Image: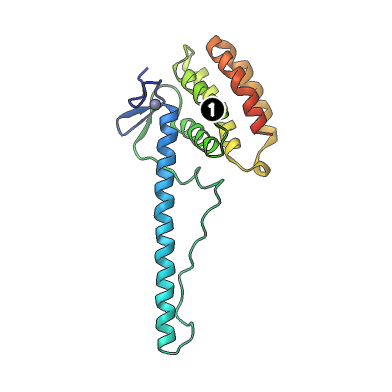
């Protein structure tokens, strides 16, 4: 098992030849999203300026507002903008956990931190790091990561969009599955109530 080249925890993904743990991956995702949001904001300003110049020219020649204007897209709502906007190039998986699962968990950690629920973010990080390193068969590990990823996706959605029929069985499934490793059991005991509370 390789370790994160930023902090030494078990690595989950490999981005441009840097093995990264879930926490460092979450930080990278947040940085990428912030970069993208900043450049979109600049484009919005640029378009607004262009619309202003066009309006001025229409006014000078006395045409009224006849020239088509750029329809400036609104800023996406904060709850949705992280999950689809990030696509780190060259990502590959280290070990059994797929990049898709790692990404969903990393996005949830980033969002949870942003919302100020640092206990949950820390518990999610600790559990995922332990899972990456756990002496558990690959297919079991992958399955647990998928369940955690599904819960992470629900966590990232606004309350009214969450699928209650998915959350309950996933929480129960993980509660059973962690039994294969005592280290995972104790970390799950911390994560489970925080996750349940946040997913209410
Ligand atoms: Zn790290």
Kindly identify the residue that appears in the image at 41 percent across and 49 percent down: 36
Q: Quadrant of ligand 1?
A: top left
Q: Which residue is mark 1?
A: 146
The structure residue drawn at horizontal position 40% and vertical position 87%, both measured from the top left corner, is: 60
Is 158 rendered above or below residue 62?
Answer: above
* Coloring scheme used: rainbow
| SS type, badge 1 | helix
Q: Seen from this angle, which residue lies furthest left? A: 17
In the visual, does 70 lie left or right of 189? left
Q: Is 161 drawn above or below residue 189 in the view shown?
A: below
Q: Position of residue 112 (x, y in %)?
A: 55, 35
Question: Where is residue 104 drawn, in percent x and y?
Answer: 50, 35
- Residue 8: x and y, percent? 36, 21
In this view, the residue in front, 53 or 148, is 53
Residue 132, position in %: x, y? Answer: 45, 20
In what quadrant of the picture does the N terminus appear? Answer: top left
Task: Tell which of 152 and 5 is nearer to you.
Answer: 5
In the rendered structure, the answer to whether residue 197 lies left or right of residue 156 reads right
Q: Residues within 10 Å of mark 1 (few under 14, many from 20)?
A: many
> On the image, which quarter does residue 197 sit in?
top right
Q: Looking at mark 1, is its residue's CB closer than 8 Å to ligand 1?
A: no
Residue at figure coordinates x 56%, y 17% from the top left? 187
Report the quarter where the C terminus lies.
top right
């Amino acid at each position: 098992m390789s370790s994160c080249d930023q902090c030494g925890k078990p690595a989950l993904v490999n981005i441009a030849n840097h093995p990264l743990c879930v926490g460092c991956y979450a930080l990278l995702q947040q940085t990428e999203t912030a970069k993208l949001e900043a450049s979109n904001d600049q484009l919005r300003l640029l378009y607004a300026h262009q619309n202003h110049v066009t309006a001025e020219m229409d006014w000078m020649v006395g045409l009224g507002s006849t020239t088509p204007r750029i329809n400036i897209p609104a800023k996406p709502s904060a709850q949705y903008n992280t999950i689809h906007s990030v696509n780190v190039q060259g990502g590959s998986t280290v070990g059994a956990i797929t990049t898709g699962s790692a990404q969903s968990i990393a996005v949830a950690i980033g969002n949870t931190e942003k919302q100020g629920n640092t206990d949950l973010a820390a518990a999610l990080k600790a559990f995922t790091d332990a899972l990456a390193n756990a002496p558990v068969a690959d297919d079991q590990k992958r399955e647990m990561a998928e369940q955690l990823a599904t819960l992470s996706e629900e966590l990232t959605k606004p309350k009214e969009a969450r699928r209650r029929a998915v959350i309950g069985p996933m929480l129960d499934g993980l509660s059973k599955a962690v039994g294969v490793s005592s280290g995972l059991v104790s970390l799950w005991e911390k994560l489970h109530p925080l996750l349940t509370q946040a997913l209410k």
